[in-house]
Structures are given as C-alpha cells and as structure tokens.
Image (cartoon, helix red, strand yellow):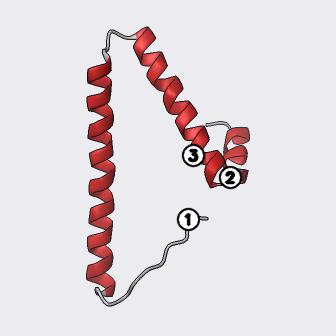
Amino acid sequence: MCIKCIILEITMDFDEQTDAFRFRLDDLCEHFLEEFDINVFTMVGCLEEKRREILDVLDIIEDKKSDLLGTDIIFDLDED
C-alpha cells in the first residue's frame, strides 16, 4: 500500500473508513466476476467463510480476555 493511501486512511473517520472498505470490496468482487471464471455462489461462499473466520478470531480473543482478566470486569468499548 502506498504512503499516500496509508495517510488518507489514518485521517478518515470511522464512517469514511467503512465506506472505503465497502467500495474496495465492491471493486474486488467486480474484478473477480469479470476477470475470472467464478460464479456468485462461490464468491458468497468465500465471503461467508471469511466472515466466520473473523468471528472465530473475535471469540478466541474474548475467551482469552476473560481468562486473563476474569469475568467480573466489564468493558465499555466506544467505537467513535
């Protein structure tokens, strides 16, 4: 990734970063549909597999956090 791209991504707020991710994902999907012999069902299956992989990692992190800190501590995460 170029330095200019990194600087732009750092200065974007949460909504702008979300939009950038969605636009790049749209471009990536369009590219694979046009340039490769892949169908929509395969693409959706791959995206679902990635979604599950990400959620599994988050579950592991949550379990490790509970193991290290105990379950009586409540975290209030602010995404703003």
Q: Residue at x 26, y 30 (%)?
A: 45
Q: Which residue is mark 1?
A: 79
| Label 1: element kind | loop
On the image, the x and y values in percent for residue 59 come to: 28, 63
Determine crowd level at label 2: few under 14, some 14-19, many 20+ residues with C-alpha closer than 10 A. few
Mark 2 vs mark 1: which is more N-terminal?
2
Q: Residue at x 55, y 40 (%)?
A: 21
Q: Is residue 55 above or below residue 25?
A: below
Q: Which mark identifies residue 18?
A: 3
Q: Quadrant of the C terminus?
A: bottom right
The kind of residue tagged 2 is Ile
**Residue 40, located in which quarter of the rendered image?**
top left
On the image, the x and y values in percent for residue 76 come to: 48, 78
Alpha carbon of mark 2 to alpha carbon of mark 1: how far?
15 Å
The kind of residue tagged 1 is Glu
On the image, the x and y values in percent for residue 48 come to: 29, 38
Alpha carbon of mark 3 to alpha carbon of mark 1: how far?
12 Å
Front: mark 3 or 2: 3
Q: Which residue is mark 2?
A: 10
